[in-house]
Image (cartoon, coloured by chain):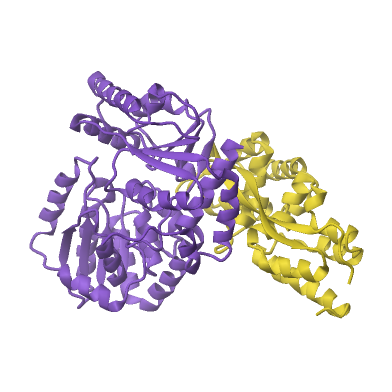
Chain colours: A purple, B yellow
């Protein structure tokens, strides 16, 4: 059943007081201005999910917000996946033909799409070269969602020639910023507390969904929700679980999906299935991109939430888990380090062994886990809800448009 | 009770965080950075810390001190930087000079430059403050007190934690307004002497409300 489009006022019940009034007052300064988002997929992955949520909110406060998606061949998405991996530090090979494919698809999209707006926000590397071919009217911003703290030099050099043409760039963490001649802003991504993935659920709803997914609730549940991607280290999670399992009985649920622009997902999933084979307490769930309610229920049913990434953009599944009042154990990577306050809202870990130790500690100290979960929810309320994101973007529009 | 001819308009603010793309991996690089970055960057790492610590506070109320103590694990420098109260300085350049002197003196006493081994480097940032009118205004001390209670913490920061002083904007300075419009120089002086450095925005508001309630009680408007 489609969700009713949310209005800003619906958020008064969950966000810090005064926040909604502040958004309305800030929005008055950009009334009627247009904001166009451009990315590479409408379904799957954090960016698409975020745009689905906050474009209606921008529209609700009087900003003419739009969303365009570039289209490309399989070859193009293989190239952009290589860019994605290279910018996150993996060594990749780029042939001249690959670079030509990337530029050609961007050129075609620039000709096809209507990119006229006061502010044009281009998400991630896939459409970054649109700026080379489009006729620019408003301010163009490049919004980078991935961890480019240690990019492969050749990939970054190639991309940088386009980035320097933007009016500004946005990164999710200070460590992702680069030496660039344009202003670089820090905006943390956010979660929507009223979405199907994050709204409150009753105990009956949670039980019914867990039954449907065939996940018994007879023992503590460890949960990692993420795409089947090597950077999320699902094999490392299974290895940590195996260490814990020698001492503490528990279940492990690995739930995730793949995105249109991620051709490696199926291969990683098959490796995970192989590693989990034969253990009835490991549940690997391949969920469709629409399984928000299922993820919500799994997070609420979990005892501990894991996000053992070895490279990460921001890792919003951490904030999602924290919002459910659960302690989160996350890899010391990307934005996980700003969401998890060590020992207060959860633990960051640097190894399979560290992950196993903290799981054991929390399983055996339920009062500590409960207090961390409470801290975690409040920390998210103050810092990682969609309304804070809205304020940051409005403030940036005000600053850029004068 | 006297009513002001000119109302006091409460303004709140939002901080746009800009990264300078400059990092420090050791204390020499931190010193070089502090010498060279724009004033808005020093402002971000000291005064505007309070805007970012509404729920969970860092060990020290300035980023330089916290970085030295936590990431470099040089607690001595952390403590020396932490004691620098930015509200004591007339302008940001005087504050810059003090920070430089402290780090320079500290490094001169060490055989090697302390650096990050396991921690994170220091990322220099810059603050852009976006002003937002709250729509709340006061013409009397009672209305002023109620406004202080009602506004969000961004407004407390804006009016009492340095934005006003930094911009030298008398028309949004509540202390000037209390003095000139309500003719309350004693109260204005008392608020001026309230040092916000070792409190949070919420803690400062609580102290401020106590002072205002006390004065209202004295004049029989409690």
The image quarter in which residue B219 lies: bottom right
Looking at the figure, which quarter contains the C terminus of chain B?
bottom right
- B89 relative position to B49: left or right: right
User: In this view of the protein, which residue sits in the foreground, A372 or A25?
Assistant: A25
User: In this view of the protein, which residue sits in the foreground, A41 or A151?
Assistant: A41
Q: Is residue A183 visible?
A: yes
Q: Position of residue A278 (x, y in %)?
A: 7, 63
Residue projecting furthest to the left: A278
Residue at 40% from the left image edge and 65% from the top image edge: A323
Q: How many marks?
A: 0
Q: Position of residue B84 (x, y in %)?
A: 72, 53
- Does residue A247 sit above or below A23 in this rendering? below
User: In this view of the protein, which residue sits in the foreground, A291 or B125?
Assistant: A291
- A286 relative position to A298: left or right: left
Looking at the figure, which quarter contains the N terminus of chain B?
bottom right
- Does residue A56 sit above or below B211 in this rendering? above
Residue at 62% from the left image edge and 43% from the top image edge: B128
User: In this view of the protein, which residue sits in the foreground, A250 or A349?
Assistant: A250
Q: Is residue B123 visible?
A: no
Q: Position of residue A173 (x, y in %)?
A: 46, 45
Residue at 45% from the left image edge and 45% from the top image edge: A172
């Amino acid at each position: 059943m489609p969700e009713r489009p949310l209005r800003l006022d619906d958020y008064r019940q969950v966000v810090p007081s005064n926040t909604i009034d502040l958004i309305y007052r800030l929005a008055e300064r950009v009334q009627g201005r247009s904001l166009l988002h451009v990315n590479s997929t409408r379904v799957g992955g954090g960016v698409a999910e975020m745009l689905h949520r906050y474009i209606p909110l921008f529209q609700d406060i009087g900003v003419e917000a739009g969303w365009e998606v570039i289209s490309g061949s399989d070859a193009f998405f293989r190239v952009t996946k290589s860019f994605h991996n290279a910018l996150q530090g993996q060594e990749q090979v780029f042939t001249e033909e690959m670079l030509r494919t990337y530029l050609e698809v961007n050129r075609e999209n620039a000709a096809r799409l209507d990119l006229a707006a006061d502010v044009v926000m281009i998400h991630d590397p896939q459409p970054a070269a649109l700026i080379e071919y489009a006729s620019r009217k408003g301010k163009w911003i490049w919004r980078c969602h991935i961890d480019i703290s240690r990019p492969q030099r050749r990939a970054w050099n190639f991309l940088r020639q386009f980035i320097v043409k933007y009016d500004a760039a946005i990164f999710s963490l200070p460590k992702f910023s680069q030496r660039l001649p344009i202003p670089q802003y820090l905006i943390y991504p956010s979660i929507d507390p009223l979405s199907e993935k994050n709204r409150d659920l009753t105990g009956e709803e949670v039980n019914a969904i867990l039954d449907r997914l065939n996940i018994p609730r007879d023992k503590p549940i460890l949960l990692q929700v993420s795409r089947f991607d090597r950077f999320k280290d699902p094999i490392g999670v299974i290895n940590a679980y195996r260490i814990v399992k020698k001492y503490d009985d528990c279940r492990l649920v690995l739930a995730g999906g793949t995105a249109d622009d991620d051709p490696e997902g199926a291969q990683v999933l098959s490796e995970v299935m192989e590693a989990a084979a034969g253990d009835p307490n490991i549940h690997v769930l391949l969920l469709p991109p629409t399984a928000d309610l299922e993820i919500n229920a799994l997070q609420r049913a979990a005892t501990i939430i894991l996000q053992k990434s070895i490279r990460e953009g921001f890792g919003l599944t951490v904030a999602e888990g924290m919002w459910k009042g659960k302690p989160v154990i996350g890899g010391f990577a990307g934005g996980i380090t700003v969401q998890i306050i060590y020992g207060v809202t959860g633990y960051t870990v640097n190894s399979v062994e560290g992950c196993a130790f903290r799981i054991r500690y929390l399983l055996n100290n339920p009062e500590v886990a409960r207090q961390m979960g409470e801290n975690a929810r409040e920390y998210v309320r103050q810092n990682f809800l969609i309304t804070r994101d809205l304020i940051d973007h409005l403030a940036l529009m005000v600053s850029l448009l004068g | 009770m006297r009513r002001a001819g000119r109302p006091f308009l409460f303004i709140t603010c939002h901080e746009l965080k800009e990264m300078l793309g400059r990092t420090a991996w050791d204390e020499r690089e931190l010193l070089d950075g502090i010498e060279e970055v724009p004033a808005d960057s020093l402002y971000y790492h000291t005064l505007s810390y309070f805007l970012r610590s509404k729920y969970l506070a860092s060990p020290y109320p300035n980023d330089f001190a916290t970085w030295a103590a936590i990431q470099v694990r040089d607690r001595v420098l952390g403590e020396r930087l932490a004691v620098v109260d930015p509200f004591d300085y007339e302008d940001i350049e005087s504050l810059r000079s003090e920070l430089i002197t402290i780090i320079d003196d500290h490094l001169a006493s060490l055989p090697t430059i302390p650096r990050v081994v396991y921690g994170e480097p220091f990322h220099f940032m810059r603050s852009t403050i976006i002003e937002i009118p709250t729509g709340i205004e006061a013409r009397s001390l009672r209305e002023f007190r109620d406004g202080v209670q009602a506004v969000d913490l961004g407004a407390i920061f804006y009016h009492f934690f340095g934005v006003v002083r930094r911009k030298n904007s008398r028309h949004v300075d509540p202390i000037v307004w209390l003095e000139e419009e309500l003719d309350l120089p004693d109260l204005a002086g008392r608020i001026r002497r309230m040092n916000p450095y070792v409190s949070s925005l919420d803690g400062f508001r609580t102290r401020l409300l106590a002072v205002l309630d006390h004065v209202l009680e004295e004049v029989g408007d409690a």
